[in-house]
């Protein structure tokens, strides 16, 4: 197998460092995902004439839900054997080594756990504010796709979640990992998720009404089917997956896909009208 035409990727994952503090590209992409999501959702809330204060509250629920869900998802789904004996390290950015406490940050966030965390945060928010869960989820998934695209871009900068060896012209040698040309699996997902964002955003902007749960269902089908398929050309993240027919990421994607098909195919005549104007709306 010849890797002569491969792309050499040797970018430092640290964006900048000052006074001992390091800002990684992954963190930058992660936070940028929330900023972009807020901007787009503000347009949605303005169009639907909903208070920006509610969006501010929703953002807190989603941020906390995403972070906790992604962290707990990694610990429970991928490294349970370790974290079952180190419960504090699940939720605190520390590690106990040789009788000392070391500040490590959160190394390990699982997207499926993040998805569960997002919907949990959304449920709690809707329960508090009496907003309709499905109505809001149909709109929130637009920006979740965009945020997912940015997170995968961050994974690319980190040279993590790498693909299997490949001799395709766009194969990438991740110099911080090894000297093997591989599928840039992170970019495959990032581009696909961005495409989902564009599709959902354009549909929402042009549609006169939405069948309740349709956009949520389409999002779940598209995003997690892509995740399921890309896993076939990824290196397994943990050793225990090597003996599995489907890896953990694929097994965790299946329930999301099934829920998506249920939402799309169920008989539901109720629709949500979408305002034709795009004015600034009301703010309380």
Image (spheres, helix red, strand yellow):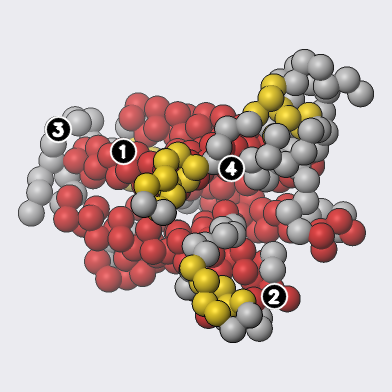
Q: Is residue 174 left or right of residue 105?
A: right
Look at mark 4 in the image and give the residue it sits on.
Answer: 158
- Foreground mark, 3 or 2, reads 2
Work out how far the residue at label 1 is from the one at label 3, CA to CA, in angstroms.
14 Å
As rendered, which of 60 and 154 lies closer to the eye? 154
Q: Which numbered disc covers residue 40?
A: 1
Q: Residues within 10 Å of mark 4 (few under 14, many from 20)?
A: many
Comes first in the chain, label 1 or label 3: 1
Q: SS for tag 4?
A: loop
Q: Residue 89: which quarter of the image? A: bottom right
Q: Residues within 10 Å of mark 1 (few under 14, many from 20)?
A: some
Q: Nearer the viewer, mark 1 or mark 4?
A: 4
Residue 41 in sight in this render: no
**First of labels 2, 4 by sequence position:** 2
Q: CA distance from mark 4 to mark 3?
A: 40 Å
Image point (59%, 65%), residue name: 73
Give the numbered dot on residue 199.
none
Q: Is residue 100 visible?
A: yes
Q: Is residue 63 above or below residue 140?
A: below
Q: Is residue 239 above or below residue 228?
A: below
Instruction: Tell me the number on the disc at residue 279.
Output: 3
**Alpha carbon distance from label 2 to label 4:** 23 Å
| Observer-nearest of 238 and 260 | 238
Residue holding disc 2:
82
Q: Give how far across and how far down residue 97 sits, in percent.
A: 61, 77
Q: Earlier in the sequence, mark 1 or mark 4?
A: 1
**Callout 2: helix, strand or loop?**
helix
Sequence-earlier tag: 1 or 2? 1
Q: How far is disc 1 from disc 4 in space, using C-alphas?
A: 26 Å
> Who's the residue at 74% across and 25% down the image?
171
């Amino acid at each position: 197998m010849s890797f002569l035409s491969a792309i050499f990727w040797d970018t430092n994952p640290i964006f900048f460092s000052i006074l001992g503090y390091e800002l990684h590209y992954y963190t930058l992409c992660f936070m940028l995902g929330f900023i972009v999501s807020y901007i787009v959702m503000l347009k949605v809330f303005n169009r639907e004439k909903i208070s920006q204060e509610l969006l501010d509250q929703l953002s807190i629920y989603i941020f906390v839900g995403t972070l906790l869900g992604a962290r707990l998802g990694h610990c429970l789904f991928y490294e349970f054997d370790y974290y079952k004996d180190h419960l504090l390290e699940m939720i605190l950015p520390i590690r106990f080594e040789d009788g000392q406490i070391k500040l490590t940050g959160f190394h390990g966030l699982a997207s499926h756990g993040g998805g569960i965390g997002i919907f949990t945060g959304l449920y709690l928010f809707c329960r508090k504010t009496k907003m309709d869960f499905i109505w809001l989820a149909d709109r929130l998934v637009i920006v979740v796709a965009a945020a997912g695209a940015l997170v995968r871009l961050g994974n690319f900068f980190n040279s993590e979640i790498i693909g299997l060896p490949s001799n395709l012209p766009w194969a990438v040698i991740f110099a911080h990992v090894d000297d093997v040309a591989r599928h840039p699996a992170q970019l495959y997902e990032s581009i696909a998720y961005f495409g989902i964002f564009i599709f959902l955003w354009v549909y929402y902007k042009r549609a006169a009404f939405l069948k309740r749960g349709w956009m949520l269902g389409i999002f779940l089908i598209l995003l997690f089917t892509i995740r399921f398929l890309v896993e076939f050309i990824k290196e397994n993240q943990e050793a225990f997956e090597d003996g599995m027919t489907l890896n953990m990421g694929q097994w965790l994607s299946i329930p999301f896909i099934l829920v998506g098909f249920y939402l799309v195919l169920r008989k539901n005549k109720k629709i949500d009208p979408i305002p034709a104007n795009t004015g600034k709306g009301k703010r309380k």
